[in-house]
Image (tube, rainbow, N blue to C red):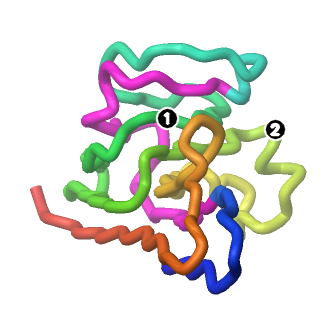
Amino acid sequence: MTTENTGMSDFVIGEALHTYLRIGDIGAVARHRLAGCDYWDKVGGSTLRKQDSAISFSGETDRVYINTAAECVIEDDKLKRRIHIAKSGSLSTVVWTPWTEKANKMGDMGQPDGWREMVCVESVNAIDNVVKVAAGTKHTLIVEYRAESV
């Protein structure tokens, strides 16, 4: 995704490539390579926290990991695969799953437990990592997804 500033003044943008990924079961996947990263926990009162290990899911999760260009890996044992998410031009990553209560209010999960078979992983520039696009320049956010069998 490229944003071009054709104007005479600089501007600031927040941006996201919003991606829902199909997985075998949200309770049986883990996200790797964000350990040690700071994140804003939007479910936990918008508090700043540090990720101490791989991410696993046991309830609603809505986090904005900041100051990281790290490639992420989703370990999906049920579908016997790893999903690699590599990015450039992005210093934030959003990890989100609605869990039961929020999913029941949404109406777009396809089936009553459809949320169990998805995780949202966004390559983002947000909060602490919005981007200044100088007059006459461009900013490009690139994401590459790769799945491998395990």
In this view, the residue in front, 145 or 127, is 127
- At a point 22% along the width and 67% down the height, the residue shown is 147
Instruction: Give the percent coordinates (x, y) of residue 47.
Output: 68, 16
Which residue is identified by label 2? Answer: 101
Q: Say left or right for 108 vs 94.
A: right
Dot 2 or dot 1: first in sequence order is 1
On screen, residue 131 above or below 33? below
On screen, residue 120 above or below 22? above
- At a point 58% along the width and 56% down the height, the residue shown is 132
Q: Helix, strand or loop at disc 1?
A: strand
Which residue is identified by label 1? Answer: 65
Q: Residue 133 falls in which quadrant of the image?
A: bottom right
* Three-letter residue code for mark 2: Glu
Q: Which mark is residue 148?
A: none
Q: Say left or right for 68 vs 95.
A: left
Q: Does the stretch in magenta take in 141?
A: no
Residue 74 appears in the rendering: yes
Q: Which residues are magenta?
A: 15-41
In this view, the residue in front, 136 or 14, is 136
- Specify few, some or many for label 1: CA neighbours under 10 Å numbering under 14, 14-19, or 20 or more: many
Q: Quadrant of the C terminus?
A: bottom left
* Three-letter residue code for mark 1: Tyr
- At a point 77% along the width and 49% down the height, the residue shown is 103
